[in-house]
Amino acid sequence: QVQLVESGGGLVQAGGSLRLSCVASGSTFSSYDMDWFRQAPGKQRELVSAIRSGGSTVYSDSVKGRFTISRDNAKNTVYLQMNSLKPEDTAVYYCAAGSVYYLPNYWGQGTQVTVSS
């Protein structure tokens, strides 16, 4: 079982930056693919970015070039650096983990990101 705890969300003006963090419990963090999903009101949850256990990364087209995902296996932590934020980035952001990045088994509770125009 893996528990995930996100932090770093908040309110920011358009063009600003935030860094989300997700700390995972357990000793097998390095073996998991780690994801960031988001869900805006009235919309389906979507994959924002993923970093595989081997270190390769995936980004949605909507955030490519603005967001950067990284992981620190020594700290059991995955990060999402979000720059040049837009109002359409407003959503609840969820950290997720699994053996395959597009099918996570574990989810965090979510952290709200609000971007004002």
Image: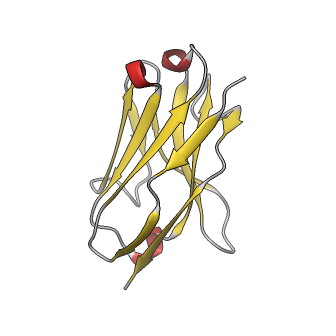
Residue at 28% of width from left, 69% of height from top? 16
- Please state the horizontal and vertical placement of residue 108, each as a whole percent of the image: 64, 43
Quadrant of the frame with the N terminus:
top right
- Please state the horizontal and vertical placement of residue 3, each as a whole percent of the image: 66, 32
Residue at 46% of width from left, 20% of height from top? 53
**Quarter occupied by residue 112:** bottom right
Give the answer, above or below, for where 3 lies relative to 29. Answer: below
Give the answer, above or below, for where 20 lies relative to 22. Answer: below
Residue in front for this viewpoint, 4 or 96: 4
Give the answer, above or below, for where 81 lies relative to 89. Answer: above
- Please state the horizontal and vertical placement of residue 49, each as a whole percent of the image: 46, 45
**Horizontal side of residue 79 vs 83, given as left or right:** right
**Number of numbered labels in the structure image:** 0
- Please state the horizontal and vertical placement of residue 58, each as a whole percent of the image: 42, 39
Residue in front for this viewpoint, 58 or 111: 111
Residue in front for this viewpoint, 7 or 82: 7
Quadrant of the frame with the C terminus:
bottom left
Q: Please say which color scheme the image uses.
A: secondary structure
Residue at 38% of width from left, 30% of height from top? 71
Residue at 53% of width from left, 39% of height from top? 35
**Quarter occupied by residue 97:** top right
Give the answer, above or below, for where 41 lies relative to 100. Answer: below
* Residue at the bottom extreme, as displayed: 117
